[in-house]
Amino acid sequence: MTRLYNFCAGPASLPDPVLATARDEMLDWHGSGLSLMEMSHRSPEVVGVVQRAEATLRELLGMSDDYAVLFLQGGASTQFAAAPLNLLAEGASADYVNTGQWSKKAIAEARRFGRVNVVASAEDSNFSTIPPQESWQTDPGAAYLHYTPNETIGGVEFSWIPDSAAPLVADMSSTLLSRPLDVSRFGVIYAGAQKNIGPAGLTLVIVHRELLGRAQPLCPTMLDWKTAADNESMYNTPPTFALYLAGLVFEWLKELGGLAAMEAINRRKAGALYAAIDGSDFYGNPVELPSRSLMNIPFTLADPALDKLFLQEAEAAGLLNLKGHRSVGGMRASVYNAVSEQAVAALIAFMQDFEQRRG
Ligand code: PMP
């Protein structure tokens, strides 16, 4: 069996030990004679798995009990609607920061449910910067302030947490669990699982309990965070197998030494890849230095006519999914937690070899 190096932006690499455990437990989970997939979500076995996953996640993030952890479905895209539906009372407005394609989608969806004030936009710089907070035109009466700490497509990331009097709502799909996080600075954190959390099909929402119970009257029961909080994410059938895998990912992170240890590895990986890009005239990355993403690293070739060949040869060398997002072109290496330092070293060696042969 050969496991190739996978730089996909999502669904992304999962840790080998997690997949191996899932394989070993697939047909007969812990001597039960059943696969976990085949069990009632209300069985003590599955409830135990979900509770353990939540406890490990709380431990990793050092999160207080003031926050509810919700395991939902529908992806981060559903939370683009859930945020205004849960937090925007009639006539109220919300502040949004626009730093790229995912911010824009969140803004467009929120506009369907209430008034949105775009406090700052990096569109003028083609989303290669993060607008400094001094320049933001925030509304003192805003119900919340929404931002996207890491733009998966543009590869631009906040290296700081905004100060906000209004509850801070963050789409952390492509950065959560890549490093330690002070959850207490946030009102709501949400993320699709398919980057650093687990497989697609699971959506994580972390919400301060004070913000529950404020949903607009028309908010569907399934989108009201309070429904999930009151029912421990079991109002309906949750994605049990995805939750089981997420729990294994959380345990893998804990064994590795937690989020501080993960951050050190991620900084080495990103540092090495950016150094290779910056050290060559053949490769480029347009993002301003302090706002470069640790997780998603776009790069271009000086001659875009070589893009196709680069991707073909990379694939032949076992380096998969390096094509940039269709909206920006070029290449993108997503180096989430489960992408190893060896994978990044192999990519850098390939890039240098390609440049020597074709540059
Ligand atoms: N926000 C960000 C930052 C993302 O990277 C993605 C997915 N790539 C989404 C939202 C949409 O997530 P989903 O597909 O889970 O709806």
Image: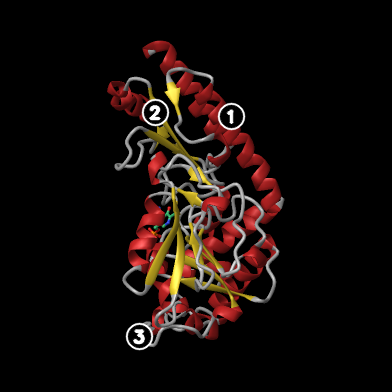
Report, in whole angstroms, how far the alpha carbon at label 3 lies from the one at label 1: 49 Å
- Between circles 2 and 3, the one closer to the viewer is 3
**Residue type of the residue flagged with mark 1:** Ala
Q: State which quadrant residue 274 falls in.
A: top right
* Mark 2 residue crowding within 10 angstroms, few (<14) / some (14–19) / many (20+): some
Question: Is the C-beta separation of discs 2 and 3 under 8 Å?
Answer: no
Residue 156: x %, y % from top left: 48, 43
Circle nearer the N terminus (2, 1): 1
Q: Residues within 10 Å of mark 3 (few under 14, many from 20)?
A: few
Tag 2: amino acid: Thr
Front residue (pair 298, 74): 298
Relative horizontal placement of residue 182, taking residue 294 as reference (left or right): right
Q: Nearer the viewer, residue 85 or 69?
A: 85
- The relative height of residue 81 versus residue 162 in the rendered view (above or below) is below
Residue at image position (45%, 39%) is 128
Q: CA distance from mark 2 to mark 3?
A: 46 Å
Q: Of tags 3 and 1, which is closer to the observer?
A: 3
Q: Look at the image and tell me in which quarter the N terminus lies.
A: top left
Please name the amino acid that badge 3 sits on: Leu
289 in relation to 87, above or below: above
Q: Which mark is residue 218?
A: 3
Q: Residue at x 48, y 52 (%)?
A: 195
Earlier-in-chain disc, 3 versus 1: 3
Distance from disc 2 to disc 1, alpha carbons, whole Å, reads 17 Å
Tell me, yes or no, if residue 10 can be seen here.
Answer: yes
Q: Position of residue 162 (x, y in %)?
A: 59, 57
* Position of 353 relative to 158 (above/below): above
Q: How many marks?
A: 3
Q: Residue 45, position in %: x, y? A: 56, 76
Binning the other alpha carbons within 10 Å of mark 1 as few (below 14), some (14 to 19) or many (20 upward) gives some
Disc assigned to residue 300: 2
